[in-house]
Structure formats: structure tokens, C-alpha cells
Image: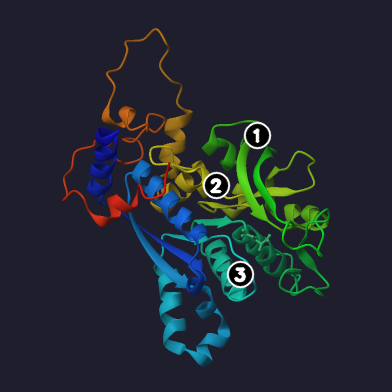
């Protein structure tokens, strides 16, 4: 166990190629939810052979009002978004900063910057698309605007609004994949379904789905009834976007060192411009079981054997080129099982 941890810590400390991720959140209420996201980013960076540079962006400062109230913070926050290789909007509750998150999703979509949305991050992506692509300017979530005439995100019908304590849709649920060629299916290497964990009260309004899909926002994962939207991706053509994916579930909850979450890995690889070579390498037929056995590599013993690390630019080696034992490598293990 100790040797395994040392190998992972060494690999973490030896990563050099930087990848800059802007995480758009509400940092006065730093919650456990964000800590799981940070760990999932670290696991993905380690698998991709990239060094994480995380920029924390307070969503509220991206909003136009901040230009008047706090011009310096507005400027630096947008600079952080513009400098990012990838934009991540994690889960969240309550309406403060939501408009800033919607603007960040719009920026990532329009500027073809890799985007990963989680839970609320998927809901804001859908609201943004409805407003700016479908032209439904007042599209909103009933969580933030209960009287909105154009709800893109609605309270889940079978949940009672009167009993807030027990109203959350929680835990492991099945997502049925709608197409074997979507990015999510390729990353998970699954054709039919994936199981991930949930924590939400609102969902995409199923009535708006046909319009959204006709305009290119594809619901590539749905629950078993087909009524609840679980994963969206921008249609590959004509968007030409390198990575635009968002999930209603929380992929970070199942991420582990040596077993990065597929969506996080895809996001990091796309942010480091390595996603295509990774997907091509995965599509290459594996050697037949009768070919010469390969000596286990350090990557195999790290549980990274599913990854063709050389194909994605990682060293695939566990040598410790840089100083070992940094705080970052220690943090990698805290709280993970
Ligand atoms: N975990 C989340 O991001 C929740 C998103 C949203 N507030 C909901 O309840 O559906």
C-alpha cells in the first residue's frame, strides 16, 4: 500500500506540462462538493500526465453589475476565464453567481474552450443555450426564478416542494446512453449505460428538449424512463467544439487515484489538446491474447493500464524527476478511499 502511494506521489510530483483550469464557483461557501471536484481534477491530470493549475473564479464577479461595484475583480475574473485551457462549472445551489456561471458557459461554448458542467453546471449550460442559441432570452430555472415564463430547468415533478428535507434525488442511478458515438460513450468505453451518483432537486425541462436538440445540444444520456436528462454534449458537427459536456450527476464522487473519472479525464485531455490522440489510441485494436505477454509497466501497477500514456503525451513512468513529497501530492490522498 505504501509503495503504491509513493509511486502515485512520485508521478504527481513529476508532472510538468501545465493545464490551466478555471473553476467558476461560490467560494465563500467552500463545500465538500468542491473538494471532491478538485481531487477528481488531480486524478485526471495524473492519468493524462499534466500538471494542474487551478484558478478559482468567483462567479459573481463575472456579472455585468460587478463592473460597477468591483471593476478590478470583474477584470481579473474575466482575465482568468480568458487565460484558461478549460472552464469547469461545478454543482451548486441558490441563485448568487448563477448569471456569472451562465456567462462562463457561453464564453466556453462560443470560444471553443473545453467545458465541463456538473449538475448546476449542466443546468446553466442548458439555460445559456436556450437563451443565446434558441433566442429564448428569458429562459431560466424555476430554482432561481419561480415565475419564469420559459423554464429550461424545472423542479422534478415527483418531488414535493413542501418537504424540502427529503426532496433531493440522491445516490447511484443509471444513465442510459443514447448513442455509441457520443464522447461520453467513448470516454467511459460503454455502449449502453453508466452508473453515477446524484444530488439534485431540479432537472432539464423535458418539454424543451426537442428544440434544444434540433439546434445542436444533444442529450446523449437519459434516465431509464427517457424523461430525465442526464448528459448533454454539443453536436460534434457543425460546432467543431473540442469538448463541451455536462452531466446532471456528479462524476467526481466515483473518481479515485489511479481510476480517474472518464468525463474529467476527457475534459483535462481536451484542455491539454490531447483528447484526439487519446481517443484514436483507444480505438486501435488491442493485441490478440496470444501475442507475447508484456512486462507490467509502472503505469500498470498504478492501475493506469487502461491509458495509453505515451499516446497522450504522459511519460508513463513513475520516476521522480521533481522534488517529491509536495503538499499537492499529499493532498491527493486525503479523504479518498
Ligand atoms: N448539486 C447541484 O448542483 C444541484 C443543482 C440544483 N441546485 C438542483 O438542485 O438541481
Q: Out of 130 and 328, give the one closest to the viewer.
A: 328
Q: Residue at x 66, y 66 (%)?
A: 128
**Helix, strand or loop for disc 1:** strand
Q: Quadrant of the N terminus?
A: top left
Element type at mark 2: helix
Q: State the residue in front, 169 or 320.
A: 169
* Of residues 73 and 182, the one drawn nearer to the viewer in this rendering: 73
Residue at screen point 58% across, 41% down: 184
Q: Earlier in the sequence, mark 3 or mark 1?
A: 3
Residue 223 lies left or right of residue 44; in this view the side is right
**Distance from label 2 to label 3 (Cα)?**
21 Å
From the image, tell me which residue sits under label 1.
Answer: 193
Closer mark to the observer between disc 3 and disc 1? 1
Would you name the residue on which mark 3 appears? Answer: 102
Badge 3 density bin: few <14, some 14–19, many ≥20, Cα 10 Å: many
Could you say which disc has been placed on residue 251 in the image? Answer: 2
Q: Secondary structure at mark 3?
A: helix
Quarter of image, res 57: bottom left
- Neighbour tally class for label 1: few under 14, some 14-19, many 20 plus, Cα within 10 Å: some
Q: Is residue 306 visible?
A: yes
**Left or right position of 132 against 70:** right
Amino acid at each position: 500500500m505504501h509503495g503504491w502511494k509513493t509511486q502515485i506521489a512520485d508521478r504527481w510530483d513529476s508532472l510538468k506540462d501545465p493545464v490551466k483550469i478555471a473553476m467558476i464557483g461560490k467560494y465563500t461557501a467552500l463545500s465538500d462538493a468542491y473538494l471532491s471536484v478538485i481531487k477528481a481534477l488531480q486524478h485526471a491530470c495524473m492519468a493524462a500526465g499534466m500538471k494542474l493549475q487551478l484558478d478559482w473564479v468567483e462567479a459573481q464577479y463575472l456579472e455585468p453589475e460587478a463592473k460597477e461595484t468591483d471593476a478590478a475583480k470583474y477584470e481579473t475574473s474575466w482575465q482568468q476565464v480568458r487565460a484558461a485551457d478549460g472552464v469547469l462549472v461545478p454543482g451548486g445551489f441558490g441563485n448568487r453567481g448563477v448569471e456569472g456561471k451562465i456567462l462562463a458557459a457561453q464564453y466556453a461554448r462560443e470560444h471553443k474552450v473545453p467545458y465541463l458542467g456538473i449538475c448546476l453546471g449542466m443546468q446553466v449550460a442548458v439555460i445559456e443555450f436556450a437563451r443565446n442559441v434558441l433566442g429564448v432570452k428569458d429562459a431560466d430555472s424555476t430554482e432561481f426564478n419561480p415565475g419564469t415564463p420559459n423554464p429550461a430547468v424545472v423542479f422534478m415533478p415527483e418531488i414535493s416542494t413542501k418537504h424540502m428535507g427529503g426532496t433531493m434525488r440522491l445516490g447511484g442511478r443509471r444513465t442510459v446512453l443514447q448513442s455509441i458515438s457520443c464522447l461520453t460513450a467513448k470516454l467511459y468505453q460503454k455502449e449502453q449505460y453508466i452508473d453515477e451518483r446524484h444530488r439534485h432537486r431540479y432537472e432539464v425541462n423535458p418539454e424543451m428538449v426537442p428544440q434544444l436538440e434540433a439546434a445542436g445540444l444533444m442529450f446523449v444520456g437519459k434516465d431509464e424512463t427517457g424523461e430525465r436528462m442526464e448528459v448533454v454534449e454539443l453536436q460534434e458537427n457543425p460546432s467543431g467544439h473540442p469538448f463541451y459536456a455536462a452531466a446532471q450527476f456528479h462524476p467526481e464522487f466515483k473518481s479515485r487515484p489511479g481510476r480517474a473519472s472518464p468525463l474529467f479525464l476527457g475534459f483535462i485531455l481536451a484542455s491539454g489538446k490531447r483528447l484526439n490522440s487519446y481517443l484514436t489510441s483507444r480505438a486501435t485494436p488491442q493485441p490478440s491474447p496470444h501475442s507475447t505477454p508484456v512486462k507490467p509497466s509502472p503505469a500498470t501497477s498504478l492501475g493506469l493500464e487502461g491509458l495509453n500514456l505515451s499516446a497522450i503525451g504522459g511519460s508513463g513512468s513513475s520516476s521522480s524527476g521533481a522534488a517529491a513529497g509536495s503538499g499537492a501530492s499529499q493532498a491527493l490522498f486525503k479523504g479518498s478511499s
